[in-house]
Image (cartoon, coloured by chain):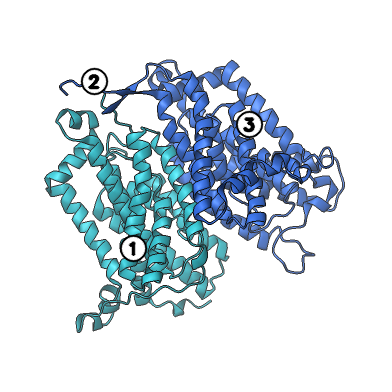
Chain colours: A cyan, B blue
Amino acid sequence: MDLGEINPVLLVASLMVAATPLLLAAIGELVVEKAGVLNLGVEGMMIVGAISGFAISVETGSPWLGFIAAAIGGAVLSLLFVVLTQVALANQVASGLALTLFGLGFSALMGQSYVGVKPPSMGDIHIPVISDIPVIGPILFQHDPILYVGIALTAAVWATLKYTRVGLILRAVGENHDAAHALGYKVIKIRVMAILFGGACAGLGGAYISLIRVPQWTEGMTAGVGWIALALVVFASWKPWRALLGAYLFGGITVLQLNLQAAGVAIPVEYLAMSPYIITILVLVILSADKSSAPASLGRTFHASH
Amino acid sequence: MIVLEKRPQPSKAWSYATPLVAVLATMVFGGLLFAILGKNPVEAIGTIFWEPLFGEFAFYYRPQLLVKGAPLVLIAIGLSLGFRAGIWNIGAEGQYIMGAIFGAGAGLAFYPLDAFYIFPIMVIAGAFGGWLWAMIPAFLKVRFGTNEILVSLMLVYVAEQMLASVSLGLLKNPEGFGFPGSRNLQSYDSAHNAELIAGSGMHWGVVTALIAVIFSYVLLNRHMLGFHIRLTGEAPRAAKFAGVNPARLILFCLGLSGALAGLAGMFEVSGPSGVVSIDFNVGYGFTAIIVAFLGRLHPVGILLAGGLMALTYIGGEIAQSQLGLPAAAIQVFQGMLLFFLLAFDLLTNYRIRAARSEVA
């Protein structure tokens, strides 16, 4: 065992990479839940995004096109959730599970010919001078562009929810859909937009795993990240900046346990590998005491009877 | 323009018809999917649904139906009780794994002793393992209000790591030449969940699944607790006034579904599978969710749905070897089934009407 081999600068830098898929998926789900919809299909949308992004970027040679395809792939799958919960008024928990089960199978089917293929690399940004500052440079300014997209998205969602009319309407729909309907807002339309946005974000998060974090395609490679993202939204009390903080915390745990595995700590690999899931449970327990910040209409079906 | 009108009462006829309509729709769209994959859709669907029952080698496949169906029914029966009351245990896969580890562990602890009491002890240990694993989300929900969906699911990943750990360490076969995996319980008579009638596929797990179906039917229709479960699901406010204790209900539903999933894992590891190994679990815990819904959360329905789902598993394997249909295609097929079921369920609760033209 040699803990000295763990380089703190690299650790923090890779923490940000590990956190980005979580952040992207969690920000998307946060918007969905703010609109009063509980979509448990995040894992399914992520894995479909992961394979769509992977396939398109391998075929076209462009990671950018891959990420666009991933967002579309995630959104298309979430469209199925829209049909089930907003049109057919099905139970949201069951529909979300269906989305995940279907997505896992569908991605495995699509990904058969891509196992073992290496995707084109996106490359890290490099800003002269700033990126070369010791310590701060490698941590903050030497990443792939999507990582910054994730942070920008967090800021955008925060600002939209807090300062704009659209954000206000979205929150109104999530808090009390009957009142929002009575005020003349199109509850279903707003929810559909939110679900599609959530799907696109989850797709991006999935593609980040298959194109940048790993980067290759294996079946079921999201390995519960989508579920942790769902837990993260609870952790964040539905606040975007706390989602960012939470994502970095979970990213940190993941990276740290991987580093400890590599350093050959006396703890068996399996126990290290289960630690992110156990910590997710612990965090949920600590935070579940306060439910006041959850959107009041979360998970309830809306049907305008008049 | 069409509008949906909520029915005063869910339609009985549609609630029976939707699973059938969903299966038909899945066959059509599944066939379409197989056609896109370059297979003859009629042949593929025929292979999946006909071959295992009436094909040339049906004598081999029919017993397999029981072997694959039993764990699905056993787990789905447990899940359905919770689902009816709005208690979502989706970590049955983890409870299934823990049941197998506990059951096999208890049996292997006696190795190589030969005694009649070993198998019953394994059954109890398996049920206990699953129960214990399900009590974690149950306790956390009752005590802290933690979301049971996320906790039970996270515990699946923890259980998978546990499985890897024991098959490489604690339960590893000391005479296995260093390969991962435990001793084969099939060759340890006192711990072997053998077929009760040779060649029938009937083992103790199948018997237990049938008992569970009957038990659940009686519970739901003849017992106060079953009434409380249904009441909580259909009218939570009324349940509160009727004095239903939600904490007790959560502990009961999660505990029972965990124990049943644990039993399923234990019967599987001591019978058809035989070995505790890294790839022991094949997703029965998740497929059972589809089975529970397809069976309309009704014991008899679940029995039929479990049979159907076992059929798609076996038929899928045949289609895989005969037609080269990818294994994942069957997974998609099963996922589709749940989709169509949820979508067509609309007809049970709502009436579709042409809107009269009036001022909105």
Whether tag 1 and tag 2 are in contact, CB under 8 A, the answer is: no
Query: Residue tagged by mark 2?
Result: B356
Q: Is residue B93 left or right of residue A248?
A: right
Select label 3 or label 1 by which is in front: 3
How far apart in space, not on screen, are marks 2 and 3 (Cα)?
Answer: 43 Å
Whether tag 2 and tag 3 are in contact, CB under 8 A, the answer is: no
Query: Residue tagged by mark 3?
Result: B303
SS at mark 1 in the image? helix
Which quadrant is home to the N terminus of chain B? top left
Q: Percent position (x, y) of residue B81? A: 54, 29
Specify whether residue B140 is in view: no
Select label 2 or label 3 by which is in front: 2
Q: Chain of mark 2?
A: B
Whether tag 3 and tag 1 are in contact, CB under 8 A, the answer is: no
Residue drawn 58% across the image and 65% down it: A268
In the foreground, A189 or A212: A189
The image quarter in which residue B218 lies: top right
Select label 1 or label 2 by which is in front: 2
SS at mark 3 in the image? helix
Q: Chain of mark 3?
A: B
The amino acid pointed to by label 1 is Thr
Residue drawn 80% across the image and 46% down it: B192
The amino acid pointed to by label 2 is Arg
Query: Residue tagged by mark 1?
Result: A20
Q: Chain of mark 1?
A: A
Question: Which is more N-terminal, label 3 or label 2?
Answer: 3
